[in-house]
Structures are given as structure tokens and as C-alpha cells.
Image (cartoon, helix red, strand yellow):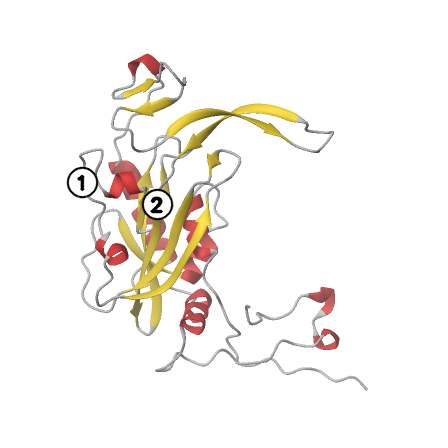
Amino acid sequence: MTSTRATPAGPRPAQRGDGPDRRFTLSALADCGSVMTDDQFHAWLGEMGRREESHVERIAFKELDQWSFDDATGNLGHDSGRFFTVEGVTAHTGSPAHGVWRQPVIHQPEVGILGILVKEFDGVLHCLMQVKMEPGNVNRLQLSPTVQATRSNFTTVHKGKTPLYLDHFTRPGGSTVLVDVLQSEQGSWFFHKRNRNMVVEVTGELPVHEGFCWLTLGQLRRLLAVPDLVNMDSRSVLSCIRFTDPYGLRRPSRRHRPPGGAAPLARAG
């Protein structure tokens, strides 16, 4: 005689007092967004691509505006002394296979902000994402966090505009900080560079500017499988979100796990 483990009909709806872990999980399980469907998102993204009129051209270093090589160090840097410098390093390892090598590295001794705003629609958290053009993107436009900015950028060293929605991360006020984690940039190319990875919840009215859209974590989870769409900074923030068991169950024992060792969505942490 064999016994079977009943599968719950579904996660219980969100309730007042639920913690952020559970609310994130219910958003990740949402089949469809309340603001736009997956099909509507792809149509919107296509329209954003048709409106995007950028042109990227590779030029010689000597043609760079306000960027130059330092005569003493040879480092490439900005005239303001801010942003970052490109420097050379020699790496020594104890590995016979790698030994010693030399390479350029980006030195940016400041902490940037990678932040996603979230808000409930019909009881489900949605993320405010930005479709962003960057000169090195394979397909020009990628899905970025609400705010993606170095300190030099958001303090307007470049004399440009302050990033939209920045105040929600630097001065949250009535907003609620759900995630705030320091994470390192890729150590292969950045020297001791870190970013604050943040998720902040808003409850009041929030204007949605052109190039921004609301998506559930479930929609983002599906978009992660689309090549060259969800950028690295969005993935970094999403990786800091904690999830929980949507059914309120304990972690299943080894003997009750399905064939192949895969277990139902289990409590994180």
C-alpha cells in the first residue's frame, strides 16, 4: 500500500499583516498582472523600441569629451575627478593554471543605487520597471530597475537630470523599505565597487513616466527566460528578495519529495 501527499488547491490570498516574504511569493505566483498582461507588455516594449532613436558609434579615446589619460598614472578618468577611472592591475594567484596576469579594471570608489519600487494592485505587489537604452546593450533596450544610478549620476556631476523616482530611495519618507542589501559589482572588472540593492513599497498615487511599467514578479520570472531582456542590475535586485512557502507548509521531508528530488516551493532562509 502506498500513501500519497495531497497537493493543496492553491496558496491562500494575501491577508492583512502578511510579511513581505509572503507578499513577494504571491506576486511571483501571479499568472497575470493587474496593470498589463504579458502580451500587452511585449506590444508596449515593441512600441518603445520603435520610438527609440539612439545612435552608438565607436570613437577614438582622443575624441572623448571631458575624458583623458592622466600623464602621471596613465589612468583614464573624467575631468571632474568623479565617476570612475580605468586603471591597470596585476593579479597574482597561487594557481599554477593561472599564475599572474595583467588587465584593466574599473575603479569607482562610491556606492550606487539599484532600486525597484513596488505597489499593490488588486492585493498583489507589482514592480515598477524601466525600459532603458545603454550604449553596450545587444538589443539597445533592456528592462532595468526603477532607479539604476551611480552616486556621480544621482548627484548630477554630469550636470544632467536627477533620475526619476530617486527620492523614494534616498529619502523614503512615507514609503516602506522592504529590501536594502549591499552587493558587489563583478569583481573581474570592478575594483571594490558596491551597490545598494533596494526594494521600496509605495502606497499613494505615483505618476508612471514614459518608459516605465508595472509588472508582477511572476511576469518578471517569465521574462528572465527571454535572452537579453532583463538586465544584470534588475537580476541583482531580484536576487535579494526572500520568498516563503505559499501554502504555509513545512519543508517536505526527503521521503515525501517528488521523484527526482525536486521539492515544492519551500521556505527561503
Point 53% across, 74% down: residue: 245
Pointer 2 residue: 112
Residue 11 vs residue 173, the one in the foreground = 173
The number of numbered discs placed on residues in the rendered structure image is: 2
Q: Position of residue 227 (x, y in %)?
A: 48, 42
Q: Position of residue 78 (x, y in %)?
A: 29, 25
Q: Quadrant of residue 121?
A: bottom left
Point 59% across, 29% down: residue: 91
Residue 115 vs residue 25, the one in the foreground = 115
Residues at badges 1 and 2 in contact (C-beta under 8 Å)?
Answer: no
Q: Quadrant of the C terminus?
A: bottom right
Q: Nearer the viewer, mark 1 or mark 2?
A: 2
Point 30% across, 38% down: residue: 49
What is the three-letter code of the residue carrying label 2?
Gly
What is the three-letter code of the residue carrying label 1?
Lys
Residue sitting at the far front = 72
Q: Position of residue 146 (x, y in %)?
A: 30, 51
Secondary structure at numbered mark 2: strand
Mark before the other along the chain sequence, 1 or 2: 2
Q: Is residue 39 left or right of residue 221?
A: left
Neighbour tally class for label 1: few under 14, some 14-19, many 20 plus, Cα within 10 Å: few
Pointer 1 residue: 161
Q: Is residue 245 left or right of residue 126?
A: right
Residue 174 against residue 235 in the figure, above or below = below
Q: Quadrant of the N terminus?
A: bottom right
Residue 190 vs residue 242, the one in the foreground = 190
Residue 160 against residue 169 in the figure, above or below = above
Residue 240 against residue 132 in the figure, above or below = below
